[in-house]
Image: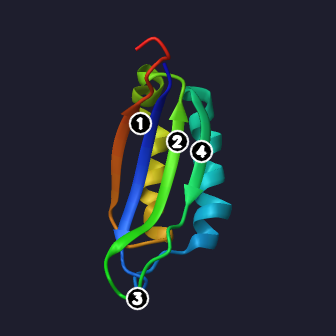
Amino acid sequence: MSVTVILRYEGTSADRFDREYYCNTHMPKAKREWTPYGLLDARVFFPALQDSRKGTVCICECVFSDEAAVKAAFTAACTRELVADIANFTDLPMTPAILKTLSAEG
């Protein structure tokens, strides 16, 4: 059963979030580092922010093969480097959420 991890950044349109760095440097590195642990796919979404109200600046959806893959990736040494890299594209905190995919049977 696959597991989806949502990594969310909340802020305003005035907050620093370097989309180019995130898409062209950070995400390719995350895919490269986590694929051996069971990352199947990763997608990035940038919701439109309305004026200066706080909202979701970025959503990253990472699909792993199973719960063991998530645990292996998130406890790997490379993940400490990925977390440290956040400072290169934003000052916003990252909020993770784990979603389990249900099989057709239940």
Label 1, residues with CA under 10 Å away: few <14, some 14-19, many ≥20: some
**Percent of width and height locating residue 85:** 48, 60
Q: Is residue 86 above or below residue 35?
A: below
Specify whether 8 is left or right of 88. left
Of 106 and 79, the residue lying toward us: 106
Q: How far, Cα to Cα, is label 4 from label 1? A: 15 Å
Check disc 2 and report its element: helix, strand or loop: strand
Q: Residue at x 62, y 33 (%)?
A: 35
| Residues at marks 3 and 1 touching, judged by CB atoms closer than 8 Å | no
Q: Which numbered dot is residue 42? A: 4
Check disc 1 and report its element: helix, strand or loop: helix
Residue mark closest to the camera, 1 vs 2: 2
Q: Is residue 24 above or below residue 83?
A: below
Label 4, residues with CA under 10 Å away: few <14, some 14-19, many ≥20: some
Check disc 4 and report its element: helix, strand or loop: strand
> Which amino acid type is marked by label 4?
Ala
| Residues at marks 2 and 4 touching, judged by CB atoms closer than 8 Å | yes
**Percent of width and height locating residue 53:** 32, 82
**Percent of width and height locating residue 76:** 45, 34
Q: How far, Cα to Cα, is label 3 from label 2? A: 28 Å
Image quadrant where one finds the C terminus: top left
Q: Which numbered dot is residue 51? A: 3
Q: Earlier in the sequence, mark 3 or mark 2?
A: 3
Q: How far, Cα to Cα, is label 3 from label 1? A: 35 Å
> Which amino acid type is marked by label 3?
Asp
Residue mark closest to the camera, 3 vs 1: 3
Q: How far, Cα to Cα, is label 4 from label 3? A: 28 Å
